[in-house]
Image (cartoon, rainbow, N blue to C red):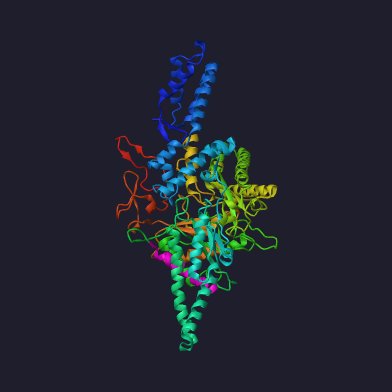
Amino acid sequence: MMKVIKRDGRAVDYNKEKIVIAVEKANKEVKPRERVTKDEIKEITKYIEELDKKRILVEDIQDIIEQQLMDMKKFELAKKYMIYRYTRALVRKSNTTDESILGLIKNQNKELLEENSNKNAVLASTQRDYIAGEVSKDLTKRILLPEKITKAHEDGILHFHDMDYFLQPIFNCCLINIGDMLDNGTVMNAKLIESPKSFQVACTVMTQIIAAVASNQYGGQSVDVSHLGKYVRRSYEKFVKELKEEFGDELSQEMIERIAKQKLKKEVSAGVQTIQYQINTLMTTNGQSPFVTLFLNLKQDDPYIEENAMVIEEIIKQRYEGIKNEKGVYVTPAFPKLIYVLDEHNCLKGGKYDYLTKLAVKCSAKRLYPDYISAKKMRENYEGNVFSPMGCRSFLSPWKDENGEYKFEGRFNQGVVSINLPQVGIVADGDEEKFWKILDERLEICKEALMCRHYALLGTLSDTSPIHWRYGAITRMKSGETIDKLLKSKYSTISLGYIGIYEVTKLIKGLSHTTPEGHEFALKVMKHLRATTDRWKEETGLGFALYGTPAESLCYRFARIDKEKFGEIKDITDKGYYTNSYHVDVREEIDAFEKLTFESEFQKISSGGAISYIEIPNMKHNIKALEDLVKFIYENIQYAEFNTKSDYCHVCGFDGEIIINDNIEWECPNCGNKDKNKMNVTRRTCGYLGENFWNEGKTKEIKSRVLHL
């Protein structure tokens, strides 16, 4: 039976009676000679049914009805039908949020319940954020955005990210200037927070800053923990001073230092535990733990490098151990994300800090964290600089202040719009010349959408988020100032994302982008996207960047829309997902080393950041192989992460394969947990993500027992 795709994305059974009723209502509005007969109405429904489509958009049905009435020379009736259709659209537009909000409250809104695995949509606090988000999306689509942009978003031409926050003058993600805030103090809730005198207090203040920042932006944030080394030394000096004052000449200098180091070790452990527990127990105003990344980078010229090595070691040790859930089982916390920097002194080539990298690899095998950045490759790609990506994994473009000094901390991203490359390929229908023409047309729509993000932030007052604009997270402005100067002069970035290099190459060249011919075309597309964003940057003076960072849910959204519009296309829409950015399709036979080598060429083109991931089996008993991969990352690619093929249940700590039962539910075989928010189900290789179907015996059959997630 044909499925009709409603405007809200629901699939319902085709019902010809609805067509009959709609046409008959229009019939009553015209003179008898302008009406269609019942037989003619049957002809219309028969025409639609003989299209023999499995799925059809409700708008396409309405377009067909209008065209059929015109073909029958019933022009007055066609006009009345159009008016009827327009009137219905106005009714829908007058209230578009009731159903979604009530569905959320009743825990029936599947899209919202599964939208963000870091949010528990059953919690009242989270629901309040979602309700506000639904109102924001409604006003954004109906009023705030040009109709052309809204239609492009709905048609899957582009994706206007984070509509649920567009109503407010807040931005995407940032690098907190944590060094300035700790050294010079800050203000929270109108209370002065002075520079900490110890490591423990510095950790507490840092987590308070993280929570305040997270509550006033919608993206991730990153913190460079190298700023904590200074406070480790302060604690040590404090301990030495206290011991000397208490014991005087009773203890030798050597004994005082020994005791002070023991006390310091305990304080570092307690401080890191404070960071871990605070981040995982604090709840921000958007109903989730702060989306934060800790950047673990040992800088060669850092006067506090030894202290920072202590901090990094403790962070990795505690992540390896995990954190207890409500059942008392040690589980992997979602936050903070960890990014470990590989450099000459810790890239497993006999460097002084190789022991930290070995510990990081051991942690990756068990907990999947940390991710890895190659300082060597990053310096090649970013004018000799090594710095953290923002919480959302996007990178800032290099920018110098008035003194000619590079600055990264205290900068941010204004927002993201992503282009659907496979749809360009589908519409071009194999014609490469047509492809480039359509691509440029759609890129201009993306630019217009991105400028909407920029214009929406212009005029924002520093008082809208004091923690960002007045007290150091980004800058220190006066009350009443606008943030406009930070939106211009390329200080902040505006990102163009992209989905489906693999699929668009298949559509235009008939080959994967891992083949020589496909590779040449894929690079040409990437370089064109980069050149376009570079041109926008020069034309506007704004920080446009090409963003190749994972957008997992968007991969499915674009694929779903295109399947509904264009039907099932082999190796394209039939998979149920598009491949993210430049990544190799999960079904291709390629080993980890080949994949990293191949994708590294694409990473450096994405000026706004990129990460590659590699699928590996459970590596707990093969640490040496992981160490080889880490060494390879250092030499060959800027940014990579591991995904293992072992699942994890956060309720009981089960570490094996989460089964998918006959109702397509994820279920822990150890404790029976079915809550997706309390388990990790890692990526699979089969790639199927679609509906169940009924076999000839009328029993439910599953096309694949493993989902690509």
What residue is drawn where x is 59% and y is 66%? 184
Whether residue 698 is visible, yes or no, is yes
Examine the rendered structure and indicate whether residue 533 appears above or below residue 189.
Answer: above
Q: Position of residue 191 (x, y in %)?
A: 53, 60
Q: Position of residue 515 (x, y in %)?
A: 54, 50
Judged by its main secondary structure, the magenta piece is: helix
Magenta stretch containing residue 681, yes or no? no
Residue in the foreground of this view, choosing between 709 and 491 = 491
| Residue range of the region highlighted in magenta in the rendering | 305-323
Whether residue 624 is visible, yes or no, is no
Residue in the foreground of this view, choosing between 665 and 656 = 665
Q: Position of residue 519 (x, y in %)?
A: 57, 50
Residue in the foreground of this view, choosing between 597 and 358 = 358
What residue is drawn where x is 40% and y is 58%? 617
- Point out the residue furthest to the top here: 33
Q: Quadrant of the N terminus?
A: top left
Magenta stretch containing residue 308, yes or no? yes
